[in-house]
Image (spheres, helix red, strand yellow):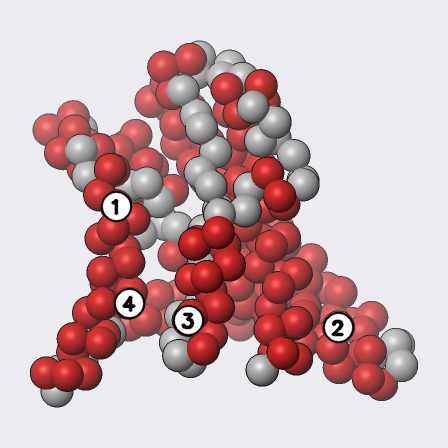
Amino acid sequence: MLYTASTWVLPVLIAITLHEAAHGFVAHRLGDDTAYRLGRVTFNPLRHVDLVGTILMPALLLLVRSPVLFGYAKPVPVNFGALRNPRRDMVLVAIAGRAINIVLATAAALLLHFAAYLPAEAAQWVARNLVNALVINVVLAVFNMLPLPPLDGGRVAVGLLPNFLALPLARLEPYGMLILIVVLLVLPVLGTQMGVDLNILPRLITGPVEFGVRTIMRLTGNS
């Protein structure tokens, strides 16, 4: 259990930290310095770690052998009204996190080629970290594009949809994380007790995640 946890800690911390920092960096470049002033445009994971989302939830999902490993950091504060073109720039800020996760997944797959040159025990541990980094970054890239605020996909949808659809969707943002926790943790337990498969989320993202991992592995010469 400890060995397994040790191969997930760094990938999860790096993936979530850079995801949030990317949001703040792009927001700063587009006119909003809120995250920059609060010290959130940083690679220091301690500025982004959320006790529940970054530590307890991934640990619980690992413990119950969930098919989906999910975590989140403290959201980077963005004042969308301060952006030079709020509607367009909201979309750019939102997809920045997903973009950095794809870059990290690709980098992990490329580094797999060098793991074999390490001593045997170190090579196995490093390779497992890199594979987990590939997987968690693809999971975050796919998961965050679900069209539910405050996920990136929800904000992209709000920025692209016409007002009569965007406004009701935007109003869901205060309840978005609660909805996700219910879908991810509560529904599967209820379904098990009722004899019904209510594990909805894995069915939504497993196919895209597997496709993303295969594609990156193929493109980096690991197939």
Q: Nearest the camera: 76 or 166?
A: 76
How many numbered badges does the structure rendering display? 4
User: Reading the chain from its start, which is encountered first: label 3 or label 2?
Assistant: 3
Q: Secondary structure at mark 2?
A: helix
Q: Which residue is mark 4?
A: 185
User: Reading the chain from its start, which is encountered first: label 4 or label 3?
Assistant: 3
Q: Secondary structure at mark 3?
A: helix
Q: Which residue is mark 1?
A: 176
Q: Position of residue 57 (x, y in %)?
A: 42, 62
Q: CA distance from mark 4 to mark 2?
A: 30 Å
Amino acid type at image mark 4: Leu
Q: Is residue 9 above or below residue 24?
A: below
* Image marks 4 and 1: residues in contact by CB distance under 8 Å: no
Q: Is residue 148 above or below residue 222?
A: above
User: Reading the chain from its start, which is encountered first: label 2 or label 1?
Assistant: 2
Nearer the observer: mark 1 or 3; the answer is 3
Q: Position of residue 79 (x, y in %)?
A: 40, 20
Q: Is residue 201 left or right of residue 211?
A: left
Q: Which of the image's four quarters has the N terminus?
A: bottom right
Q: CA distance from mark 4 to mark 3?
A: 9 Å
